[in-house]
Amino acid sequence: MKNTYFTPGPAELYPTFYQHLQRAMDEQIGSISHRSQQFRDIYKFADEQLRTLLAIPATHGIFFTGSASEVWERMLLNCVEHESFHLVNGSFSQKFYDYANDLHKHAHVLEKPFGEGFDAADIEVPAYAELVCLTHNETSSGVQMRPADMHKLKRKYPKKLFCVDTVSSAPYPDLDFNLIDSAFFSVQKAFGMPAGMGIWIANQTCLAKAERLQKNDSLTIGAHHTLPTLWKHYKTFETPATPNVLYIYLLGKIAEDFNRIGIDNIRKQTEEKARMLYKFLDSSDGYAAFVKPDRHRSQTVIVATTGSPDRVKSPADVIKVAKTANMIVGSGYGKYKESQIRIANFPAVSVDQVAALIKELQK
Amino acid sequence: MKNTYFTPGPAELYPTFYQHLQRAMDEQIGSISHRSQQFRDIYKFADEQLRTLLAIPATHGIFFTGSASEVWERMLLNCVEHESFHLVNGSFSQKFYDYANDLHKHAHVLEKPFGEGFDAADIEVPAYAELVCLTHNETSSGVQMRPADMHKLKRKYPKKLFCVDTVSSAPYPDLDFNLIDSAFFSVQKAFGMPAGMGIWIANQTCLAKAERLQKNDSLTIGAHHTLPTLWKHYKTFETPATPNVLYIYLLGKIAEDFNRIGIDNIRKQTEEKARMLYKFLDSSDGYAAFVKPDRHRSQTVIVATTGSPDRVKSPADVIKVAKTANMIVGSGYGKYKESQIRIANFPAVSVDQVAALIKELQK
């Protein structure tokens, strides 16, 4: 019997994934040239579907990388001459900040404890920060930052570039790309695909910055996947190097499926399942939602505390019991393995599957 | 009816690919955690199979990137403080050199015209070059450099790091990894997989260099996929970021299939098919092998001139006619589209399929 993966990525494959893969194999998509019209049509299709799904305006390009982690590096190399600013409240926002330090950028940071969230009112962006790095959904702690707060912040600092990590939440967050200069995600989360590809959305302001930095002899914007090179090839729906043609094809197909359902419905279903999970956690004796304020509770990665002295089951117990019912629950991140579980709430799992999981956790 | 792809990458999928993919889907490999024992076993298996296939000693680690092009950048960032040296005789060796310039390295170059090859005797490595960048197989022009020449060169310059691009030839070249410090390839060529992953082999001398450069405040070795981070995670068969778990699984399985056949047999079959193709080109009125000296003729990407005034068919004609027989032949690279075709000779195409192609080209 197949398992249902409630893990926060890699995660459950989207139900239509298998038929798209079969069709791709039938059409020999794995063998076609990335310099062929057939590939350009595949890129164009994925671009159109993602553009519709996420309301991406013509000012922004859509590019493919090896992972979302790679985008952290590309964003910093291409768009920061001296200073970046990072909101850090978990392991992944921390890594974005670490990358800035590794690249010898002057990285400013505003930190909050693991599990706590940011509101626009908390934040003062340092005067010389060129890029503001936000994380919509901290996969490690299950904390979200509301798009409304991001938009408010950008309006307060209109001259700074804003970049949003939506790795484990896209297409859920309703970002206004008239305000957000760049965002990125990976395919193995809410898009229900195997891991191995990152998606980078960036606008012409980012491109202009990269072009300016490229002329500066005292720094490098890198050699591979620079924004100017990506953009140049993007104009004809090509890529500088051989891309993951198969995954781009599959992503386009799944984005099309999402568009058929409608982004509003996808978001509503996500919220409904999240409500079910938080309601269960809030009313349960054996579990507690880790994140308390409603506005900071992730809708896509729900983190629960369990295994503390007054709770019956340890995370390991919970994961083991769920597994006997063919449900794979995520462990807590890093040292939180001992006290937490993580439940992914991506479009690939249905209301019924979430209900079944809750029933199992209740036992 | 399915096509047979004789294109130099993306290329024909290896015949066992489909059954491995089916099994991966049955086992839900696309959903498993990259922090699980199941993944570590998959990485370990791929590592063991590649190690056997390519005779990689324990001094070298095996890492996964988004593409082979990414490795150009990683190699230069991690292993060059000031100066690199490049042999350039086609578009891909040129790109490796371009990357060095983009990263502001002092890049030395020895150039030969498109279609000509290098021998050890031609080459004097500049005194301060830290890294010698060789291309075993120029995918654009069908020129190879013999491993014996590479080994001779390294013996002459034992203190310099040697890195070999084997993108469109591995596992064919019999590199002596006691002499070669680093090599890399991508999976969509001779391994018969869809594009989207690069393989980077590098030894402890490369690692030591990267660790030394990392302490140098005046440069950066990058933030993503640095050699020290890759190696640290590699010790437990993990990766710094979420890798392409599915492709690593498939690569391990195909390498295992290659090992069952035996690397000697794979090499012999490759040479037999190459002999058939060159014999046909050399004896044909309608075509000519582009590369003349035997020792520089690629065994895996055979480039033929056609469409010159005295030839009957243009490359476009040849490609069109082959396509009607469900055979996809590669076009010449870049501006050579007008006068050349490229025929990939990877393990995925059999002696019979090559014979059938020759028959078709003869018409």
Image: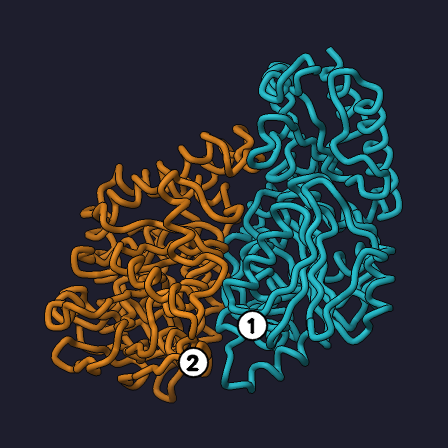
Chain colours: A orange, B cyan
Which residue does the numbered mark 2 point to in the structure image? A104
Quarter of the C terminus of chain B within the rendering: top right
Q: Is residue B66 above or below residue A42?
A: below
Amino acid residing under circle 2: His
- The amino acid on which the numbered mark 1 sits, given as a three-letter code, is Thr
Name the residue carrying label 1.
B226
Task: Let me know if residue A165 appears in the view.
Answer: yes
Q: Residues within 10 Å of mark 1 (few under 14, many from 20)?
A: many
Image side of residue B54 versus residue A174, left or right:
right
Q: Position of residue B173 (x, y in %)?
A: 80, 50
Q: Which mark is residue B134?
A: none
Residue lying at the far bottom in this picture: please name it.
Answer: A309
- B298 left or right of A325 in image: right
Provide the secondary structure element on which disc 1 rests: loop
Q: Is residue A314 visible?
A: no
Give the quarter of the figure containing the N terminus of chain B.
top right
Q: Which of pointers 1 and 2 indicates the residue nearer the eye?
A: 2
Q: List x then y, in percent, for residue A9.
A: 43, 61
For the residues beneath circles 1 and 2, the answer to whether they share a chain is no
User: Residue B362 sits in which quadrant?
Assistant: top right
Residue at image coords 71%, 65%: B132
At horizontal 46% and vertical 61% (from top left) the residue drawn is A328
Please tell me in which quadrant of the rendered image residue A301 appears: bottom left
How far apart marks 1 and 2 lie (CA) works out to: 14 Å
